[in-house]
Image (spheres, helix red, strand yellow):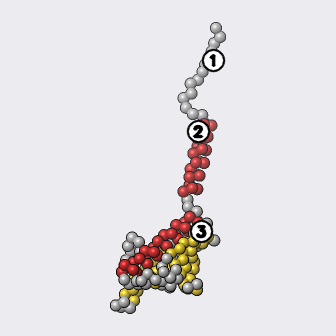
Amino acid sequence: MIPVPFQRQALGFTLIEILVVCAVVAVTLGLAMIKLDPSDSQRLNAAVEMLAGRLEAARDEAVIRGEAVAFSSDGQGYQFWRADTEHNAWVALPDTDTVASGRLAEGVVLSSLRVNGKSRPLGERLIFSFSGLVEPFALTLSIGSATGDIRVDALGRINIHRAL
């Protein structure tokens, strides 16, 4: 009878097996992080859509209240106002779900404001009348070299031109 060499039973994983599993997990997590981190154009598009929705709500608020509602921005944040005809002044609207003051997404700025095709300084109020009519205006939001536009026509209809 030939003696059978002593066979060792495997009690765990080899170092190579553990390193391969770690490498696979690291690559998978790296791809997931890239997918979860929104790109500049995705952040810009989200900011454009959010602001367009707030502007639409402001127009509706003017019609419902029967008084003018205005929008203004310093380039980083924005505010909504109502006309106080009794005191001939603008009063900041209290924050509600749809018409609330706020800040643009990180890195996104309001880079230009045009009313009737003419450039206007940031901070100027854009007024929605109680009839829903408005002077046509366009807002350009940007992040880096990417831009997105919000255009509002005289009837208060809002069109979005997204970044690609």
Q: Residue at x 56, y 50 (%)?
A: 29
Q: Nearer the viewer, mark 3 or mark 1?
A: 3
Q: Name the secondary structure under disc 3.
A: loop
Extreme-left residue of the structure: 86
Between 18 and 136, the one lying in front of the other is 136
Percent position of residue 60, x then y? 41, 76
Q: Residue, x 57% and y 55% (percent of image)? A: 35
Residue 60 showing in the rendered view = yes
Residue 153, percent from left and from top: 52, 80
Per the image, the residue denoted by label 2 is: 18
Which amino acid type is marked by label 1?
Pro
Mark 3–mark 1 CB contact (< 8 Å): no
- Asked which quadrant contains residue 10, the reply is top right
Callout 1: SS: loop
The residue identified by callout 3 is 163
Label of residue 116 in the image: none
Mark 2 Cα shell of 10 Å, populated few (<14), some (14-19), many (≥20) = few
Q: What's the CA distance linking mark 3 and mark 2?
A: 44 Å
Using the rendered view, name the quadrant where residue 100 is placed: bottom left
Numbered disc in front, either 3 or 2:
3
Sooner in the amino-acid sequence: mark 3 or mark 1: 1
Q: Badge 1: how crowded within 10 Å, few (<14), some, or many (20+)?
A: few
- The label shown at residue 5 is 1
Q: Quadrant of residue 141?
A: bottom right
Q: How many marks do you count on the picture?
A: 3
Mark nearest the camera among 2 and 1 is 2
Q: Amino acid at mark 3?
A: Ala
Report, in whole angstroms, how far the alpha carbon at label 3 lies from the one at label 1.
Answer: 70 Å
Q: Is residue 131 above or below residue 43?
A: below
Give the Cα distance between marks 2 and 1.
Answer: 28 Å
Q: Is residue 105 visible?
A: no
